[in-house]
Amino acid sequence: MKNQKILPIIFLHILLFIYSLGGICSKMAAGFPFLSIPFIGCYAGLIAILGIYAIGWQQVIKRLPLTLAYANKAVATIWTCVWSVLVFHERISAGKMIGILVIIAGIVLYALDEENENG
């Protein structure tokens, strides 16, 4: 992978980390009565996160091939699993763990193929 792609990929992963926080906001909102102050606060946080993500995504796809950006977007699923364990104390099943490993393998294989094509 060329050095000029490193910073956009790092930015993409920071952006996907931020995007994954939206899941926390929406799940927390579900625990509050409809239109209560905490409910509205959680959804306001979700809208802010989605706004940041939308603007950041446009910047990413200016600098990276769309296929590369979308291949890495699956990382958000991994972050969602991390938040489910850390914030909501949920358990990750064996099937979900296998899914996480498949996602990581797919991203690595795509990156290696991209590197070979541009090599």
Image: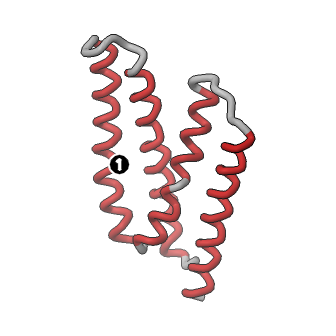
From what the image shows, is residue 33 above or below residue 27? above
Please give the name of the residue rendered at 61% of the width and 37% of the height, measured from the top-left corner. Answer: 82
Q: Nearer the viewer, residue 2 or 86?
A: 86
Image coordinates for residue 89, horizontal then vertical, percent: 63, 23
Query: 88 left or right of 14?
Result: right
Image coordinates for residue 28, horizontal then vertical, percent: 43, 22
Residue sticking out furthest to the left: 35
From what the image shows, is residue 81 above or below residue 114? above
Please give the name of the residue rendered at 35% of the width and 48% of the height, measured from the top-left corner. Answer: 53
Residue located beneath label 1 in the image? 53
Q: Looking at the figure, which quarter contains the C terminus? A: bottom right
Please give the name of the residue rendered at 28% of the width and 28% of the height, measured from the top-left corner. Answer: 44
Q: Looking at the figure, which quarter contains the N terminus? A: bottom right
Give SS at disc 1.
helix
Image coordinates for residue 63, horizontal then vertical, percent: 38, 71
Could you classify mark 1 by the number of other residues whose Cα lies within 10 Å: few (under 14), some (14-19), or many (20 or more)?
many
Please give the name of the residue rendered at 42% of the width and 44% of the height, measured from the top-left corner. Answer: 19
Q: Nearer the viewer, residue 77 or 6?
A: 77
Three-letter code for the amino acid on which mark 1 is drawn = Tyr
Image coordinates for residue 36, horizontal then vertical, percent: 28, 11
From what the image shows, is residue 32 above or below residue 43? above
